[in-house]
Image (cartoon, helix red, strand yellow):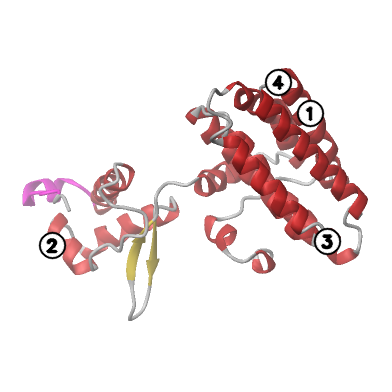
Amino acid sequence: MTALGIGPEARRRLSAPRIAEIVADELRRQIIDGELADGDLLPRQEVLVEQFNVSLVSLREALRILETEGLVSVRRGNRGGAIVHAPAKTSAAYMLGLLLQSESVVVADLGTALLELEPACAALAAQRSDRADTIVPELKEINSAMETHLEDGPEFTEIGRRFHDSVVHGCGNRTIIAVVGTLETLWTSHEQQWADESAAKGTYPSLTERRAVLKTHVKLADMIETGDVDRARRIAARHLSDTQSHVLAAGPDQRIYAVSPQALSRPRDNRHL
């Protein structure tokens, strides 16, 4: 652990919030650079106070900053401590969700963005020379799981969202994966809520419609495997338009809401309590 070594004179010139930001900056750097790995438990607070040469107040404020960013989770009580979390798209999706929610952006707007971006990811995946060894086996495995869970609507939807995530990840461009993956995470939270609620009401799409969705997934995976860029793009665009219509029919003017990383990590049945 790198000590900040803030001397007495510097400490007098800096306010407690500023010291907290410096500590948070250093811990954040260590997490991003991999010096602190996902799941690591930070030393006790009294140890960190000594290592960073700061007050307990400043250290706790630094940990609160990182907790807000989703980089640590602080456990209180006798088993207290701070657990490290590597940057994840769920955290990015939460911050983006807050921004869009504050601007009263509707879910249909998010859907339009994905209609433009995800087919491009499918096309890029079809261009990859290593697609047969990377993205294609994963897509086929997910489709097989979808077939197994055809009768469980919400589970079928959850697995289907993994297919879309894999298409995005399969594009191979790290920047696109980060940006579009964040949008996918936002959309998934809304689509999963729709799936849970429609299943409870008995209005979830029929088995025939589910089989049609699976058939399209299989066809898209085949187009990616054969390297048919244009058809992969067209199939992805048509499929997105069809599936989004179900979610948007439930409330086209519904505003985007931000879902915290902690909520996304909970079992599906407890996410909307």
Q: Which residue is mark 1?
A: 235
Q: Earlier in the sequence, mark 3 or mark 4?
A: 3
Residue 26 lies left or right of residue 161; in this view the side is left
Q: CA distance from mark 3 to mark 4?
A: 31 Å
Q: Earlier in the sequence, mark 3 or mark 1?
A: 3
Report the magenta residues as a range.
4-15
Q: Nearer the viewer, residue 92 or 178?
A: 178
Tell me where residue 63 appears, x and y as whole percent.
33, 58
Instruction: Kindly check if marks 3 and 2 are in contact, taking CB atoms under 8 A apart as contact.
Output: no
- Residue at the far bottom: name it: 78
Q: Which residue is mark 3?
A: 151
Task: Say the numbered circle drawn on residue 228.
Answer: 4
> Tag 2: Cα neighbours inside 10 Å, few (<14), some, or many (≥20)?
few
Q: Nearer the viewer, residue 187 or 4?
A: 187
Q: Earlier in the sequence, mark 3 or mark 2?
A: 2
Which marked residue is nearer to the observer: mark 4 or mark 1?
A: 4
- What element does badge 2 sit on? helix
> Which quarter of the figure is the C terminus placed in?
bottom right
Q: Nearer the viewer, residue 251 or 193?
A: 193
Q: Which residue is mark 2?
A: 50
